[in-house]
Image (cartoon, rainbow, N blue to C red):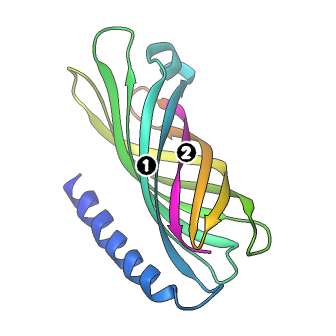
Amino acid sequence: MKRLGVLMGVLGLTLLAGTLEAQRAPLRARGYLGVGGGLGVPSGQFGNDANLGWIGHAFAGYTSRGGLWGGRIDASLGRNPLGTPGGFWIGGATANLVVTPGKRPASFHPYFLAGFGAFHVNATGGSGETRAALNGGAGLQLHLGHQSDLFIEGRFLTIRATRAVNMIPITLGFRWGGI
């Protein structure tokens, strides 16, 4: 888990440097950063065991010259209360492909993302495990001003733990940089 944190830090600093340099040229490939938080809606068998919880995200990404294609790395942390005292914690990261159709600049536009990663899952009082995860979803980005956006997104996240953890994170947040 420490290696993942160091890797995320190095990638974040690299993307930040790219963002600062890329701000000089309009409609070229650009890096961006974002944060968001919202609801972690449990589904499937996990929905029988856990209640509605919270989830937070921080991410760094890069968009192509025209803004259609991009990549994004998300770090997430969340908690869902269980029916008994305690809770269920998740934390991990995903690497995502992002597709953003439409012309730039635009006041708002949809986007689609899908990717894979690893998450550590742990029920309070129990032992945790780190397992592979897959996610996919869609969002809507509203441009607020010069390289700042408000976004809302929903996705399906499945963590392939001993008992699969399936949830739908619904996130509201801000993004800086990019196209």
Q: Which residues are magenta?
A: 166-179
Q: Nearer the viewer, residue 81 or 48?
A: 81
Identity of the residue drawn at 38% across and 36% down: 78
How busy is the neighbourhood of tag 1: few (under 14 within 10 Å), some, or many (20 plus)? many
Is residue 115 placed above or below 123 in the rendered structure? Answer: below
x then y, percent, for residue 55: 43, 37
Identity of the residue drawn at 35% across and 36% down: 90
Is residue 104 placed above or below 169 in the rendered structure? Answer: below
Identity of the residue drawn at 73% across and 60% down: 108
Residue closest to the far front: 145
x then y, percent, for residue 174: 52, 56
x then y, percent, for residue 97: 59, 63
* Residue labelled with disc 1: 57
Determine whether, in the image, residue 162 is placed left or right of residue 61: left
Looking at the image, is mark 2 or mark 1 earlier in the sequence?
Answer: 1
Residue closest to the far bottom: 25
Occupied quadrant, residue 7: bottom left
Give the residue type that dot 1 points to: His
Determine whether, in the image, residue 128 is placed left or right of residue 103: left
Give the residue type that dot 2 points to: Leu
Identity of the residue drawn at 26% across and 58% down: 5
SS for callout 1: strand
How busy is the neighbourhood of tag 2: few (under 14 within 10 Å), some, or many (20 plus)? some
Which label lies toward us, 2 or 1? 2
Q: Nearer the viewer, residue 106 or 144?
A: 144
The label shown at residue 172 is 2
Occupied quadrant, residue 25: bottom right
